[in-house]
Amino acid sequence: MFLNLSLQTHFVPHHVHHHFGFTGVSSGCGSITPAALFIDAPKEMEALSGSCLLIPCNFRAKDGTQFGSSREIYGVWIKNYPRFSNKDNVIFNSSGSVNSYKMQMTGNLREQNCTTLFSDLDKSKPNKYFFRIESEHFRATACDDPLQITVRDSPWSPRINISGEAKEKKSVTISCSAFTSCPHSPPQLTWNLQQNSHSQIEENTDGTFTSKIQQSITLSDSHDGFNISCSATYSVDEGKPGKTKETQQTLSVTYAPKETSASISPSGLVSAGSWVNLTCSSRANPPVSSFSWFLKTKDGSMKIAEGQFYTVNMTNMTGSYYCEATNILGHNRSSWIHLKNEDQQHFGAVVYITVKILGIVMLYSTIIISECCFRSRCCNKPEKDTEEAD
């Protein structure tokens, strides 16, 4: 958020002007003269203790004064109270005459850019600052709306953002960003999506900055519930370890039902006339909205019931079944399950044994008959040979 810092004008005593041979507009505080200068800067800013802060700042004169041709123009920062005459409050002058706080004018004052780099901030410093312009023909202090700087010990939490529809087979862009109070020393961003991600710095509409890393991925059901973790580490005073803050966010990916299965309880053989419970299970996001049961017939599959559970009488409803799970994204079916009661199992066993015995009997009968025929031919052959000799 920006504010207009209005500057009130009055004539400054001669001893303040002599450095410039001043003859133009002057603005101080406490006068009733209309504002002569306006400064666009954030109203409030935050900085990390031991780090730096870039203050975006632009100014313009109400009367349209331009500063490009000014032979001398300086930017001044004042703490606590805006009176320039109180030299104890003047903490920085780009002329080099005062630099009690570590500051640097990075903006081009001739282009009416007063952007300033403020280094080595700590909580012992005051939180109220005023900006002043001094040139050959114009001097003014921003009295009405000071810049509030809050110094904090704890770093800012990074933010995780997911751009796109979080749905299986869809591509989304996942980013992690962190407020960057000082683009000259941006935070190091790391996360569990990709190692050694290259971060980029973006300027916000209010002149502040944000560091960001991002990655595009194609989602599957395996990403559902995945926990994204991102950390931002800010460098502070030289020789001290950086300050780190972490953010986590769980992915929620929507997908059609998967791994649908049907189970029987009680399992194993049951007596004829007993009841068994069939249960259909599946996983899906959003959850399964309906379950359906199908019975195998000579004409194909026939839908016989709705619901996750189905009870079957083992006298009349034996056969093969499967279930189907459905949500708004699709459906998925289980494999077949086969139901038989003990009588059917015993009958089948009897039939199997009977067929097997009959097969064995037929096999031995065939062998015996073949052996008899062979011996019969062997016994009759000498008699025929004797008759031919006679």
Image (tube, helix red, strand yellow):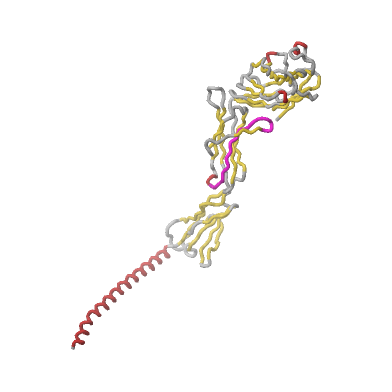
Q: Is residue 122 left or right of residue 339?
A: right
> Residue 223 at what x, y percent from top left?
54, 44
Query: Could you tell me if residue 28 is visible in this image?
Result: no
Q: Which of the two residues, 233 or 307, is positioned nearer the viewer here?
A: 233
> Does 189 appear above or below 236?
below
> Does 311 appear above or below 381?
above
The picture quadrant where one finds residue 303 is bottom right
> Does 193 appear above or below 120?
below
The picture quadrant where one finds residue 12 is top right
> Residue 352 at what x, y percent from top left?
38, 67
Query: Which quadrant is home to the N terminus?
Result: top right
> Residue 268 at what x, y percent from top left?
42, 58
Name the residue: 19% across, 85% down.
386
The picture quadrant where one finds residue 387 is bottom left
Q: Residue furthest left?
A: 390
Q: Which of the two residues, 242 or 224, is positioned nearer the viewer here?
A: 242
Q: Which of the two residues, 320 or 46, is positioned nearer the viewer here?
A: 46
Q: Which of the two residues, 46 or 11, is positioned nearer the viewer here?
A: 11
> Residues in magenta?
204-221
Q: Residue furthest top?
A: 15
Name the residue: 43% across, 61% down.
271
> Does 165 appear above or below 80?
below
Q: Is residue 147 left or right of residue 349?
A: right
> Residue 362 at what x, y percent from top left?
33, 73
- Does the magenta-highlighted stretch encompass residue 256? no
Name the residue: 58% across, 23% down.
50
Query: Could you tell me if residue 105 is visible in this image?
Result: yes
